[in-house]
Image (cartoon, grey):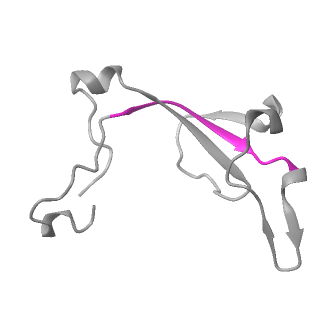
Amino acid sequence: MENLKEYTNPPDLFYTLRVKQIRKVQTPEQFIKRYEGGKSLPTRLPPKDYADIHVEELETMEGQPFDEEFYIIDFDLAEAEKGTVRRTFTG
């Protein structure tokens, strides 16, 4: 995005999708491997590996820690197909 004006024929990388729902899934402790100086964990899990208590619905991604959780984003194409989704980036 930051160098978009420098390309003579850039590909269309922007999609007119509207975010319908954002869910934050806290990684259950049994999947987090902690060791001195760090940790490792999966970036996703199948639904059978976490419970409803691990899921929180969000209004925005602002302020999220991006640490021991992952996010599920559902998109709605209805408004996009009408062409009424405004851009949510600056540039």
Q: From where the camera sits, is residue 50 visible?
A: no
Q: Where does residue 4 sit, x and y in percent of width and height?
A: 20, 63
Instruction: Identify the main secondary structure in magenta.
Output: strand
- 84 left or right, relative to 31: left
Q: Where does residue 40 sit, x and y in percent of width and height?
A: 78, 66
Could you say which quadrant of the image residue 41 lies in?
Answer: bottom right
Q: Where does residue 48 sit, x and y in percent of width and height?
A: 80, 33
The stretch drawn in magenta includes residue 15: no
Q: Quadrant of the C terminus?
A: bottom left
Q: Quadrant of the N terminus?
A: bottom left
3 shown above or below 9: below
Tell me the residue at 90%/51% (across/down): 30
- The residue closer to the viewer here, 43 or 69, is 43
Q: Which residues are magenta?
A: 17-29
- 56 left or right, relative to 14: right
Counting labels gives 0
Tell me the residue at 79%/38% (across/down): 54
Q: Report the residue that reaches farthest toward the left.
A: 8
Could you say which quadrant of the image residue 83 lies in?
Answer: top left
Q: Where does residue 85 sit, x and y in percent of width and height?
A: 28, 31
